[in-house]
Image (cartoon, grey):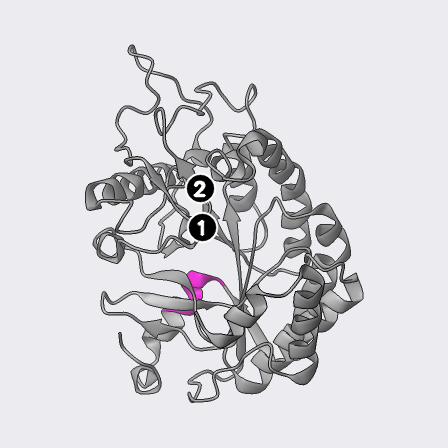
Amino acid sequence: MSSYLKIRSLLSKKNKGRLTRFLIWSGFKPRVNKNVVSPFQKGIVVFSADFEMAWAFRYSKKRSDKAVEMGLKERANFPKILSLFDKYNIPVTWATVGHLFLNNCEKDVNGLAHPEMKRPGYFTNKNWIFNSGDWYQHDPCTNLKVDPAWYAEDLIDDILNSKTKHEIGCHTFSHTDFTYNNCPPELAISELDACINHAKAKGIELRSMVFPGGTAGNFEALKQKGFTCYRKPMKYHIDLPYIDNCGLVAIPSSLSLEKDNYGWSSDYHLYLLQKYLKKVSEYKLVCHFWFHPSMDYWYLTNVLPGLIRMVDRYKVSGKIEVLTMNQLTDKVISKTNFLNNTNIL
């Protein structure tokens, strides 16, 4: 653990907020990688959404009893979020749990949900605990009308029918831990194959990956199945993507869009977001905002609209462009001099 994190872990929530505000005020946040020369003509902003509904919460250490509630909250927020991005023609990479492609499903003769799918062994990680029963035990095995927190074919159709050219990416089929420790290769392939097949039925080719809960791993399986990029937390908030040793493009993760724990006003949130946009436009690097559609309604109504308007102003002025993960990956690969400016792992 770094000295900063050690010090931060000892602070009260109130003092953590004060420290963060000081770092923002002093210019230490957001951190910018000034050691690279950008190959881009302008700054690039990416938005990605962890589109997961009830699937994300069923094994949560803190909110497993709220899985359906959170899924329905995401469903309620979704049209407002999609409409807001569409109003300004700003694309989003919707990293979608594969089961959401379904309109319905049912148990087999033995009472098992999705018997064709591989199952993880019992595990515990930072956010989840799976220590009993079957991995799919919470799946209602009904349909969209009866259990709308578990199915979202209608919402996926809304994305596809949008006037904005959004991207639909992958968030595994069942929101599983994708690390090497908790996801053997055969499970990774099973999860990816299911996502690919359900997406293909709607004419979608999956290329971008967002790991559930940041559980990165099985990069070889991603490469094998035709994926080209993934979202990754890095040292710097504003940075360049790089090509990893599997030939995949790692796209920096900059900031989660969500209500803070410190009681900040909407004006202060927008002040912080303005700093990200100013720096990404100045250094011509990449800023990747990501969010959960189940975000707090206060943030959805008081902060997100202001951010989208700011992004639109920067875009119209020519200071930035807004790309999906897939579009950014194509741009990275097309730059013949790009590897001269990045580190290969």
- Tag on residue 213? 1
Give the residues drawn in magenta, as a range.
324-329
Residue furthest out toward the top: 109
**Which residue: 55% across, 40% down?**
62
Residue 324 against residue 278 in the figure, above or below: above
Q: Residue at x 30, y 82 (%)?
A: 339
Q: Earlier in the sequence, mark 2 or mark 1?
A: 2
The image position of residue 35, as x and y in percent, is 43, 89
Question: Mark 2 or 1, which is nearer the eye?
Answer: 2
Rendered residue at 26%/49% (across/down): 181
Q: Residue furthest front?
A: 10
Pointers 2 and 1 in contact (C-beta within 8 Å):
yes
Q: Quadrant of residue 222?
A: bottom left
Q: Is residue 166 magenta?
A: no
Q: Main secondary structure of the magenta part?
A: helix
Circle 2 crowding by C-alpha within 10 Å: few under 14, some 14–19, many from 20: many
Screen quadrant of the N terminus? bottom left
Q: Is residue 73 above or below residue 290?
A: above
Label 2, label 1: how many angstroms apart (C-alpha)? 9 Å
Quarter of the image where one finds residue 244: bottom left
Q: Amino acid at mark 2?
A: Trp
Examine the rendering and report whether any part of residue 316 can be seen: no
Q: Quadrant of the C terminus?
A: bottom left
Q: Amino acid at mark 1?
A: Gly
- Residue topped by disc 2: 128
Task: Tell me the residue at 69%/46% (across/down).
Answer: 80
